[in-house]
Image: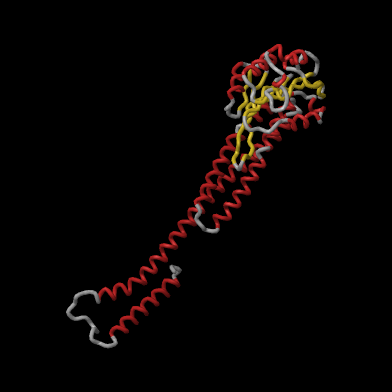
């Protein structure tokens, strides 16, 4: 790879965790080995050869060299360098530019990254930005299937997209488990501000996942209907499989969002019911206390003649009347479910 120095690159630009992670040529489904970026154009002159380049957060210099080797459109290169793109598929002449959102769970928070893909008849370039799993396993998976790999970049595109989409399914499973835990706490009827916060955070995470995955339905649809020079007729069924996976993820996210909305409403209803129950109890005890308050307040009035003041049994009779009245009212309220 010393020839890279002729073009301003160094040996450190290559290898794991570098800007150029891999640059490998394939012929008839078999790997010819790692090549330099400068040698790409020479290998593309061979029959049945395509090149797969893997980049990780490349700088402008590396992208410009890739643009030169594959004749990529300037606007697509600018998008790949700037990142922060929405999931999409754009056509530039004989090549396609595809943006995928990658996701993984980091400390119980979804970390989103991006994978930009340039794909043509004889090449595929994957550009990773932000949190993203390595595509080493994808490359190994493809190389173990030389018959499929002989189809060219279309199969590699399928393998990368399938890998990205499949990584969303475990997130949905984790969200479902978390929802069940929150649902259990909610149905206990205890108000917890933390639960409401968790419900909101979970709903927002599901919305982020849906927004990242849902646009890929259109991407798969276009790949299945158009671009036969990149995706063969036999290969369209595999993108249909990806489309099915995306549909299930979107449906699962939508269903869970609806359940979260319902759970939040149930939580609010339970809190309201509990508050009403407390209010009824307070009102019941207030009614009981109203009886002695009313009678005893009469004796605080400055009347000249008060009934039974000089009767020796007046005091215990009044207490008895108050006691009986309070017991009767308590019994009535208890039967009514207020106490």
> Residue at coordinates 64% horizontally, 25% vertically from top-left?
57
Residue 167 in picture, x, y percent from top left: 67, 37
Extreme-left residue of the structure: 304
Left or right: where 189 falls relative to 147: left
Looking at the picture, tell me which residue is in the foreground, 268 or 15. Answer: 15
Residue 46 at x, y percent in the picture:
80, 14
Residue drawn at 29 percent across, 83 percent down: 315
- Residue beneath the point at 67% across and 35% down: 165
Q: Residue 113: in sight, yes or no?
A: yes
Quadrant in which the C terminus is drawn: bottom left
**In terms of image quadrants, where is residue 173?**
top right
Question: In the rendered picture of this protein, how many numbered marks are placed on residues?
Answer: 0
Asked if residue 226 shows in the view, the reply is: no
222 lies above or below 107: above
Q: What's the coloring here? A: secondary structure
Furthest-bottom residue in this view: 312
Question: Quick check: 211 above or below 117?
Answer: below
Quarter of the figure with residue 54: top right
Image-quadrant location for residue 228: top right
Relative image position of residue 51 (x, y in whole percent): 75, 20
Which residue: 40% across, 65% down?
A: 282
């Amino acid at each position: 790879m010393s020839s890279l120095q002729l073009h301003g690159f160094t040996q450190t630009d290559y290898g794991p965790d570098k800007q150029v992670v891999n640059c490998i040529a394939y012929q008839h489904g078999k790997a010819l080995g790692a090549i330099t970026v400068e040698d790409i154009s020479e290998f593309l002159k061979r029959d049945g050869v395509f090149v797969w380049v893997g980049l990780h957060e490349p700088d402008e210099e590396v992208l410009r060299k890739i643009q030169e080797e594959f004749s990529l459109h300037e606007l697509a290169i600018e998008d790949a360098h700037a990142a922060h793109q929405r999931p999409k598929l754009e056509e530039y002449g004989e090549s396609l530019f595809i943006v995928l959102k990658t996701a993984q769970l980091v400390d119980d928070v979804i970390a989103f990254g991006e994978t930009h893909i340039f794909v043509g008849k004889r090449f595929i370039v994957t550009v990773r930005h932000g949190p993203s799993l390595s595509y080493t396993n994808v490359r190994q998976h493809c190389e173990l299937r030389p018959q499929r790999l002989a189809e060219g970049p279309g199969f590699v595109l399928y393998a990368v997209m399938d890998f990205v989409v499949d990584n969303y399914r475990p997130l949905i499973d984790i969200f479902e488990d978390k929802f069940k835990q929150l649902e259990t706490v909610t149905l206990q009827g205890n108000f917890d501000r933390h639960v409401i916060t968790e419900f909101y955070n979970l709903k927002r995470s599901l919305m982020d996942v849906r927004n990242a995955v849902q646009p890929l339905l259109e991407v798969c649809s276009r790949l299945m209907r158009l671009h036969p020079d990149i995706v063969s007729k036999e290969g369209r069924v595999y993108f249909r499989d990806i489309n099915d996976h995306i549909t299930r993820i979107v449906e699962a996210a939508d269903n869970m969002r609806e359940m979260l909305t319902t759970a939040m409403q149930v939580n609010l209803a339970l809190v309201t019911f509990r508050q009403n129950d407390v209010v009824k109890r307070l009102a019941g005890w207030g009614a009981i206390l109203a009886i002695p308050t009313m009678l005893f307040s009469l004796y605080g009035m400055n009347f000249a003649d008060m009934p039974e003041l000089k009767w020796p049994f007046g005091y215990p009779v009044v207490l008895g009347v108050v006691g009986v009245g309070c017991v009767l009212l308590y019994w009535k309220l208890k039967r009514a479910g207020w106490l």
